[in-house]
Image (tube, rainbow, N blue to C red):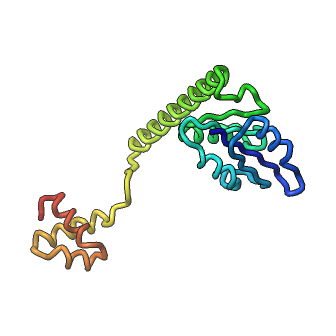
Amino acid sequence: MLIGYARVSTQAQSLDRQIGALNGANVDRIFSEKATAKTIKGRPQLEKAIDALGTDDVFVIAEWDRATRSMTDGIAIIQRVADRGATVKVLDKPWLDLTSPMGKGILAFLSALAEDERERLSRRANEGRAAAKARGVKFGPKPKLTEHQQDLALERLVAGDSCRAIAKDLGVAHTTISRLGRFHGKC
C-alpha cells in the first residue's frame, strides 16, 4: 500500500500541489495537515500516517522539506518507517526514493552512519562510567540507610529486635531491614 503525507505551515497555504503530486503517484491513502511544528510530535497527521504503515508499504512524501525540519528529524522518520517494515519514497528528491537501488544504497550509508554514532556514544558512555568508578562514584539507587544506620540495624538484629521494629524506628520498610540482615547473614 502507498501511504502519502503532505503538510503546509499555515492555514493560508494550499496543499493542492502536494496532494496532486501524491495522487499522480497513485497513493492509496493521503494524510495531510496545516501545522507549524518544530517536532514530529506537533504533527499528528504525520504520526497517524506512520502508524498506518504495514510491512512492505511505502510512505510517500510529496516534499521532503514539508515532512522534516532537520537532518536528524528526517533520519528519525526514515527509522520509524523502517521499524514498521516499510520504506520511504520522496517525490521531490529522487535520491530519497528508498525503493530504488540508489535509494537503498543511500539508506545503507545512513544506516552505517547511525551504527557508527551508536558505537561512538556507547564507547564514550562506557569510558565515562569507568572514569567515574575510578573516582569512587557509586552507581545505582541511593541507599535507604546510611552506613551508621546499617550498623545500628545489624546490632539490633543480633540483639533479637524484629525487622519491623527496627524499620519503624529508622523510617524504612521492614523488607529493607530484612534484606540487610540476609546480606550480612543475620537473618
Q: Which residue is drawn at 69% across and 53% down?
A: 45
What residue is rendered at 69% in x and 28% in y? 97
- From what the image shows, is residue 120 above or below residue 154? above
Q: Position of residue 7 (x, y in %)?
A: 78, 48
Image vertical order of residue 92 relative to residue 44, above or below: above
Q: Quadrant of the N terminus?
A: top right
Question: Looking at the image, which is closer to me, 94 or 136?
Answer: 94
- The answer to which quarter of the image holds residue 132 is top left
Quadrant location of the C terminus in the rendered image: bottom left
Instruction: Determine whether 178 is above or below 35 in the image.
Output: below
Q: Where is residue 57 in the image (x, y as percent from the top left)?
A: 60, 37
Which corner quadrant of the image does residue 157 belong to?
bottom left
Residue 118 placed where, x, y %?
A: 52, 34
Say which quarter of the image contains residue 61: top right
Asked if residue 83 lies left or right of residue 62, the reply is left
The image shows residue 42 at horizontal and vertical percentages of: 70, 55
In percent of the image, x 27 and y 66: which residue is there?
A: 148
Left or right of 21 on screen, residue 177:
left
Nearer to me, 144 or 66: 66
**Numbered label tally:** 0
**Residue at x 21% of width, y 76% of height:** 166
Viewer-nearest residue: 66 or 116: 66
Q: Is residue 37 left or right of residue 185?
A: right
